[in-house]
Image (cartoon, helix red, strand yellow):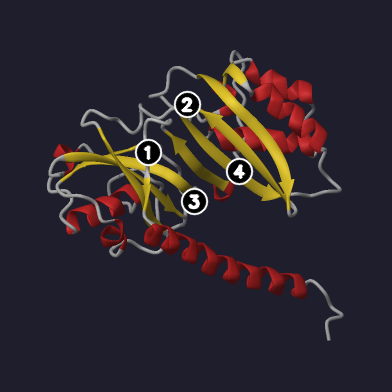
Amino acid sequence: MENTRYLFKFFYIGSKKYYGSQRQPNHRSIEQILLTALQEKKYINNIKESGFEVASRTDRFVSARGSAFSFISKKEPILMEINSVLPKNLGIWAFSEVPLDFLSRFNAEYRHYKYITPYEKTLMNVKNMKKACNALEGKHDFKNFSKFDKEEEKTIRDLQLATLHINDNFIIFDFKSRAFLRQQIRRMVAKILEIGLEIINLDDFLDLFDSSNTISYRPADPKGLVLWDVCFGSSIQFIIDMKSKERMYKYFSEKEKIHASKTRLFRLLQHNNIS
């Protein structure tokens, strides 16, 4: 089993403690924490030789449920052994053996992101927001829906899915594509919300596909964005570790209870007639 490449599924909750997922000097990141755990538990000796690679990069405060990474391991994975030295808001929950030349970034068929934001029922024109989502699907130049990046010269992407639905007073967006540009989803969401609030109309939105005009604006809050899944197709069969999955769900449940209590508190504080 020594020197076998494995592909892993993992989750993390974006917070101010992490400066995004990608390794960077003098800052704490998701990748660095994973690598430290893998070295501590003797899965990796030399990072460069291990071929460690994460399938998708995310910015600070962005979360993930089904992100993925791969590396050449010195031993067969025991997920709870690795999870035992990871913080509660980060964990591995499934794995699969893959070929030595497998690249988790380039072998992915598509990435699926969700964006969650409160639904202002009396203020938002959902019908027009859905029209904007439909317009985004297909192959377009998304230059005006992304942050300028010198490393990213080509800005044409093929968006397989762009939809939204309402669930418990929240708008949930779904986006699927083989690859996204930097801040693409957050910028698409920002403009769709402007349509919903009638700050811009659909024609203004469609004008953003004209890459000859550069338009600058703020992207939507990163805290609403979740890398929901990285799909590798039916050829990859993940083995789900139930104890690791239970660990993940237990953390989600604990946080849900805490935030539910806070939500109730702030609702009460807005009323003067509570006895």
Q: Could you say which is closer to the camera, residue 109 or residue 147?
A: 109
- Residue 115: where, in percent of width, then height? 60, 43
Question: Badge 4 is on which residue?
Answer: 115
Q: Is residue 141 visible?
A: yes
On residue 33, the disc is none
Q: Left or right of 136: which side holds 255?
A: left
Q: Which residue is mark 3?
A: 61
CA gap, disc 1 to disc 4?
27 Å
Residue 75 in the image, given as x and y percentages of width and height: 16, 49
Other-residue count near label 1 (Cα within 10 Å), few / some / many at <14 / 14–19 / ≥20: few
Q: Nearer the viewer, mark 3 or mark 2?
A: 2
Foreground of the two, 138 or 146? 138
- Name the residue located 75 percent from the left edge and 49 percent from the top edge: 119
Comparing labels 2 and 1, the label whose residue is closer to the camera: 1
* Circle 2 Cα neighbour tier, 10 Å, few/some/many (<14 / 14–19 / ≥20): some
| Amino acid type indicated by mark 3 | Phe
Tell me what residue is drawn at x 47 percent, y 55 percent. Answer: 13
The residue at the point 72 percent across, 41 percent down is: 165
Image quarter for residue 142? top right
Task: State left or right for residue 121 relative to residue 188.
Answer: right
Residue at 30% over, 30% down: 103
Residue 178: give its label. Answer: 2
What residue does disc 1 label?
Answer: 237
What whole-number distance in Å separates the C-alpha atoms at marks 2 and 4? 17 Å
- Which three-letter amino acid code belongs to the residue tagged 1? Gln
User: Splitting the image into 4 quarters, where does residue 274 fall?
Assistant: bottom right
Rounded to the nearest whole Å, what is the CA distance between mark 3 and mark 2? 22 Å
